[in-house]
Image (cartoon, rainbow, N blue to C red):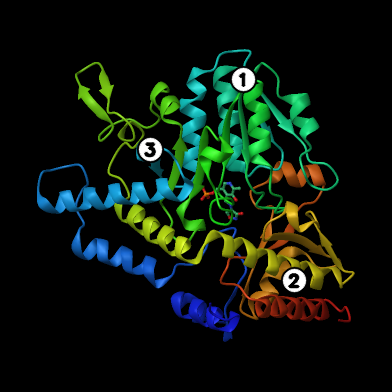
């Protein structure tokens, strides 16, 4: 068992960027909800793929192409294992959560008819709202919203009121990228299924931080992004139950996803190729697989525990200061390591640029969740978000930079 200090040093070694100097200061990276950093193991995987196996997977019988195909398939198997899906063909590689959600909103949406309803929540990222709006327009169906209570949680009574026998799809995030609220997906899915709806889960802030078993959650579809869990940008995943993916039409069409093509029509390849038109991001998939290995090695239990400890510490420090207003639950059981806040008298954008001079990276703005901001009647928040490589020292530096910022604005610390 390594001591905390040994682990912190290990992460500094494993993640070269954490040693970077920003404005002459050591980087304090608190923008993990936007994207995470990459360990050497992932950087090496990208390099090795390109050095030893790059070719177009599935095209051509030459040995290098076979090597690339095998590496791509192994990555799929590894991701299957990571979320405990039943079959590798249930893992569709996409660019990111946004593309995964667009895919499902389009392809599953094709099976809906006028009068059907889709239910989402107001706490969703735009990527889990706009594709459903497009579907609603295209198919003339109704899009309904669930709202959180004063504790930022969506009560089950909201589901009982809004999800009816007209609801064909219920799409919900596992964790909010603004309030950090963790939704009880299993319980929600059970209710939606009872009403006959299919359940789509936006796992962008889930899979990287919470041990996720899609079969235990009983999600029909589950979307996430590689770049939020140590992999490069441009690789994402859509999990879907085999029987459902087989029934719905493809999203993007063209090369790679067909069986036979004649002048006027085409038949589609079996899963997963049916949903992977065009040359895939094989190096991204291989890098995601290396990220999965790294995360498995650390253990999601450890990651959850570490992030809880950091969140508890940050909330304690922030609550000691009366100028912080926190937009999220205070009960640690209901939240992950994402804290949105406002500081009386300091605009979040000013805060972000001033703390940047201290090497601190945090996010300010509406976090691609305008309906939620409107619902709370706030225009922007600051946001810090953790990953397992953050430390209490990072939080101390953030708090001290906040004091400095307030001094710039003429407040005493
Ligand atoms: N869903 C949630 C809950 C998210 O947090 C994000 C990205 C997405 C979907 C979209 O993911 P993408 O990989 O397709 O872009 N969230 C954020 C964020 O909070 N700051 O920058 C991106």
For marks 2 and 3, the one nearer the N-term is 3
State left or right for residue 372 relative to residue 57.
right
Give residue 313's mark: 2
All told, the count of numbered labels is: 3
Name the image quarter holding residue 257. top left
For marks 2 and 3, give the CA distance.
40 Å
Residue 185 drawn at (x, y percent): 64, 40
Q: Which type of secondary structure does the marked residue at label 3 adopt?
A: loop
Residue linked to disc 1: 196
* Residue 49's disc number: none
| Rendered position, 278 above or below 47 | above
Crowding at dot 3, Cα within 10 Å, few <14 / some 14-19 / many 20+, comes out as some
**Image quarter (top left, top right, bottom left or bottom right) of the C terminus:** bottom right
The local secondary structure at tag 2 comes to helix
* N-term-proximal mark, 1 vs 2: 1
Disc 1 or 3, which lies upstream in sequence?
A: 3
In this view, which residue lies farthest toward the bottom?
A: 24
The response on whether ligand 1 sits within 8 Å of label 1 is no
Q: Percent from the top left, x then y, of residue 27?
A: 57, 78
Give the residue furthest to the left: 62
**Residue at which label 3 appears:** 87
Residue 159 placement, left or right of 303: right
State how far apart marks 1 and 2 are (Cα).
42 Å
């Amino acid at each position: 068992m390594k001591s905390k200090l040994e682990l912190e040093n290990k992460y500094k070694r494993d993640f070269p960027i954490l040693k970077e100097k920003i404005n002459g200061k050591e980087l304090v990276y608190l923008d993990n909800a936007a994207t995470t950093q990459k360990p050497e193991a992932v950087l090496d995987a990208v390099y090795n793929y390109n050095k030893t196996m790059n070719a177009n997977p599935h095209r051509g019988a030459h040995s290098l192409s076979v090597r690339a195909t095998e590496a791509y398939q192994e990555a799929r198997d590894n991701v299957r294992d990571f979320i405990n899906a039943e079959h590798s063909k249930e893992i569709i590689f996409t660019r990111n959560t946004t593309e995964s959600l667009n895919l499902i909103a389009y392809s599953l949406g094709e099976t809906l008819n006028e009068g059907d309803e889709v239910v989402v929540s107001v706490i969703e990222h735009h990527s889990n709202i706009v594709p459903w709006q497009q579907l609603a327009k295209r198919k003339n169906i109704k899009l309904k919203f669930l709202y959180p209570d004063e504790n930022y949680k969506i009560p089950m009574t909201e589901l009982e009121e809004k999800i009816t026998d007209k609801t064909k799809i219920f799409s919900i995030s596992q964790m909010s990228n603004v309030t950090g609220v963790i939704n009880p997906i299993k319980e929600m899915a059970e209710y939606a299924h009872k009403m006959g709806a299919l359940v789509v889960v936006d796992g962008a802030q889930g899979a990287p931080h919470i041990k996720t078993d899609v079969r235990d959650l009983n999600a029909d579809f589950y979307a996430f992004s590689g770049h939020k869990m140590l992999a490069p940008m441009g690789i994402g995943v859509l999990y879907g139950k085999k029987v459902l993916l087989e029934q719905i039409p493809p999203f993007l069409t063209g090369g790679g996803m067909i069986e036979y093509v004649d002048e006027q029509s085409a038949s589609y390849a079996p899963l997963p190729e049916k949903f992977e038109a065009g040359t895939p991001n094989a190096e991204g998939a291989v890098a995601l697989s290396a990220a999965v290995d790294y995360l498995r090695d650390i253990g999601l239990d450890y990651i959850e525990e570490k992030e809880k400890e950091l969140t508890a510490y940050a909330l304690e420090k922030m609550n000691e200061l009366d100028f912080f207003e926190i937009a999220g639950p205070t009960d640690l059981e209901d939240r992950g390591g994402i804290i949105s806040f406002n500081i009386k008298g300091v605009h979040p954008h000013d805060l972000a640029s001033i703390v940047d001079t201290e090497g601190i990276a945090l996010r300010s703005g509406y976090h691609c969740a305008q309906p939620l901001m409107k619902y709370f009647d706030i225009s922007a928040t600051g946001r810090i978000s953790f990953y397992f490589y953050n430390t209490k020292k990072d939080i101390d530096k953030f708090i001290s930079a906040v004091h400095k910022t307030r001094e710039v604005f003429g407040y005493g610390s």
